[in-house]
């Protein structure tokens, strides 16, 4: 019979970058979060490298995590709130609350606004894909980079322009034609609008593509 989950609440700290998705820690910022959830979990890592595969399921005591057979080529690691609260929080970020969290809202050059966390959450700081266990302890990876780059933004913009080719024809009424003209011009202007390649360049993760006519 599965063992009931023992819930616990623990406060932990973790280093964060100067800014969200930055790779610099020169300001020595520290975040504090509260975790409330299972007091321990069991995960499997690569037996040779210690890498964790995020596709693998996190097991609890209720899942008989300590007794489930270890897959070939893997080893089992127990993660507890007492020994590794930050690692436990990274595996179960939905059970963490950052203390003193604020919301920052930036005015964008195109007249819109973008809101985001003032303090990076644990899963915004570290990538679970890069976490490893060296046989003795967990090794936190480097700070998580932006989930999108300017190169990807440009490529996406180009693909959207190509996808909207042929949407405009001379015999269309202005009510149909003009939104597509405006949409395509916004796409063309996007790099300049958001300062791509300048000192005022907007971080790519803050950029939202314009909505296609009909989606607005």
Image (cartoon, grey):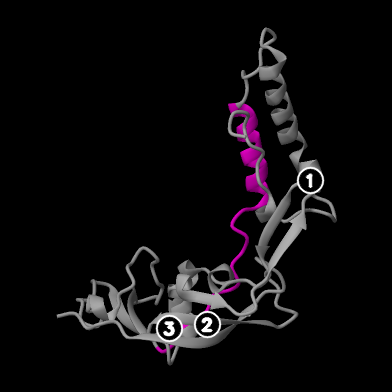
> Label 1, on which residue?
111
Residue found at x 67% / y 74% = 17
Q: Quadrant of the N terminus?
A: bottom left
Q: Quadrant of residue 48?
A: bottom left
Label 1: few (<14), some (14–19) or many (≥20) C-alpha neighbours in 10 Å: few
> Label 3, on which residue?
134
Label 2: few (<14), some (14–19) or many (≥20) C-alpha neighbours in 10 Å: some
Residue furthest bottom as drawn: 82
Distance (Cα) linking label 2 and label 3: 26 Å
Residue found at x 58% / y 72% = 121
Percent of width and height locating residue 110: 78, 44
Residue 42 vertical position relative to residue 194 in the rendered view, above or below: below
> Is 215 placed left or right of 154 in the picture?
left
> Is 60 placed left or right of 197 in the picture?
left
Residue 200 vertical position relative to residue 172 in the rendered view, above or below: below
Residue furthest left as drawn: 1
Specify whether residue 16 is painted magenta.
no
Cβ–Cβ under 8 Å for marks 1 and 3: no
Percent of width and height locating residue 13: 58, 85
Residue furthest right as drawn: 199
Q: Secondary structure at mark 2?
A: strand
In the image, which disc is placed on residue 34?
2
């Amino acid at each position: 019979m599965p063992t009931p989950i023992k819930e616990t609440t623990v406060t932990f700290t973790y280093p964060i970058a100067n800014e969200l998705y930055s790779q610099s820690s020169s300001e020595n910022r520290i975040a504090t979060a509260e975790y409330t959830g299972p007091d321990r979990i069991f995960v499997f890592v690569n037996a040779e490298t210690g890498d964790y595969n995020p596709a693998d399921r996190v097991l609890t005591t209720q899942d008989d995590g300590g007794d489930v057979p270890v897959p070939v080529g893997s080893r089992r690691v127990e993660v507890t709130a007492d020994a590794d609260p930050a690692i436990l929080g990274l595996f179960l970020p939905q059970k963490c609350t950052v203390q003193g969290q604020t919301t920052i809202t930036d005015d964008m050059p195109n007249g819109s606004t973008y809101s985001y966390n003032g303090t990076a959450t644990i899963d915004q700081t570290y990538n679970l894909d890069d976490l490893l266990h060296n046989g003795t302890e967990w090794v936190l990876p480097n700070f998580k980079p932006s989930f999108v780059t300017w190169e990807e933004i440009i490529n996406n913009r180009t693909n959207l322009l190509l996808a909207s080719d042929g949407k405009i024809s001379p015999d269309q009424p202005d009510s149909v034609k003009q939104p597509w003209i405006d949409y395509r011009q916004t796409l063309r202007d996007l790099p300049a609008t958001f300062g791509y390649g300048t000192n005022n360049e907007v971080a790519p993760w803050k950029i939202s593509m314009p909505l296609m006519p009909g989606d607005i």
